[in-house]
Image (tube, helix red, strand yellow):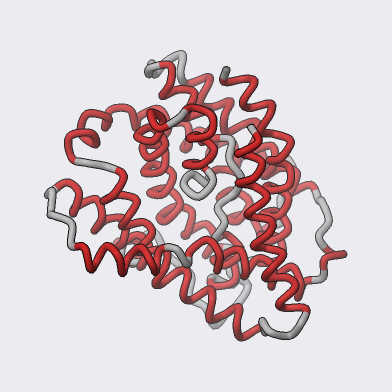
Amino acid sequence: MLESYFNILVVFALVLVGYFLSKKGLFEKDTMRIFSYLVLNIALPFNMFLNMTEKFNKEEFLSLFTGMLLPAVSILATFGFSIIYGKLTKVETSRKGLFQTMFTVSNSIFMGIPINLAIFGESSIPYVLLYYICNTTFFWTVGIYLISSDNQDPTIENVKLDVVGVIKLLLTPAMLGFIIGMVWMLLEIPEIPVLSRFANHLSGLTTPLSMFVIGMIIYHTGIKNLRMNKDTFGVLLGRYFFSPLMVILLSFIIHVPDLMLKVFIVQAAMPAQNTMPVLAKQYGADAEFATTTQAFTFLVYLFVIPILIFFVH
């Protein structure tokens, strides 16, 4: 459990670095734009490529493929519930897409791998990655469309779910990294050492730069303005109650091995995606709401972890 806490504290430490360097004037608003571009167009695609090529092999992937049904259906069920909950609580139209995405999608790799390793050990990693595939596919298609639909900036083009729009979503740098990584793994293309080292260096930028951006946004927003509201509270309910609950309820219909189920429950009850504030800014959505809610999902997770560990054991 102590290791799990340290993993969360590392996240807060990186956010604080971004905040204090902004306060000192070293990170300016233009720095935020540059870091956001680096994360979404360079670091994250390599990160997703490596997740598929280094942590899976073809035989393992194909043997576990049927296990994707439970996380896939649970994510869709959680998304459906986010729509209903949003209507009942009258979520603001300008943040509806952000709300539904943060309610539904978890931080399944950066937080998922170390937390599951701390709880279950190495045997949990294949199941962590099964959830990641479902989570990532939803996030970079439906999730991006939803975030784009909140667009308040007329100079930014909305994503559409027609043929051209879907192709554009599949050709975003992050999704391309994911697809190329999956094809590379399935074709069993040998590792190219120079490419792997290059990719690892760039992939390593994803988390620190994303956290720095969150720290910058918090500074420019004003830390006193980070207040809990009903929509943020709704996201917290989605992340830590409804999302794992959907996995548990569906497991009575879609049967999976015991360890796989426990990993899926832990994966479903993770903080929101750490790139949410960056994406909100890029697509002209409510970046302030994304940052505030992101910060609260990390903070509340400190109290969720011991409950989660007790439950799965």
168 w.r.t. 299: above or below: below
Q: Residue at x 18, y 57 (%)?
A: 191
Q: How many marks?
A: 0
Residue 310, horizontal then vertical, whole percent:
64, 21
Q: Residue at x 57, y 20 (%)?
A: 312
In the rendered structure, the answer to whether residue 220 lies left or right of residue 71 reads: right
Front one among 45 and 83: 45
Residue 134, horizontal then vertical, whole percent:
39, 41
In the rendered structure, the answer to whether residue 174 lies left or right of residue 310 reads: left
Which quarter of the image is occupied by the N terminus? top right
In the rendered structure, the answer to whether residue 6 lies left or right of residue 233 reads: left
Q: Residue at x 68, y 84 (%)?
A: 26
Which quarter of the image is occupied by the C terminus? top right
Residue 73, horizontal then vertical, whole percent:
42, 31
Is residue 261 in sight in this rendering? yes
183 w.r.t. 88: above or below: below
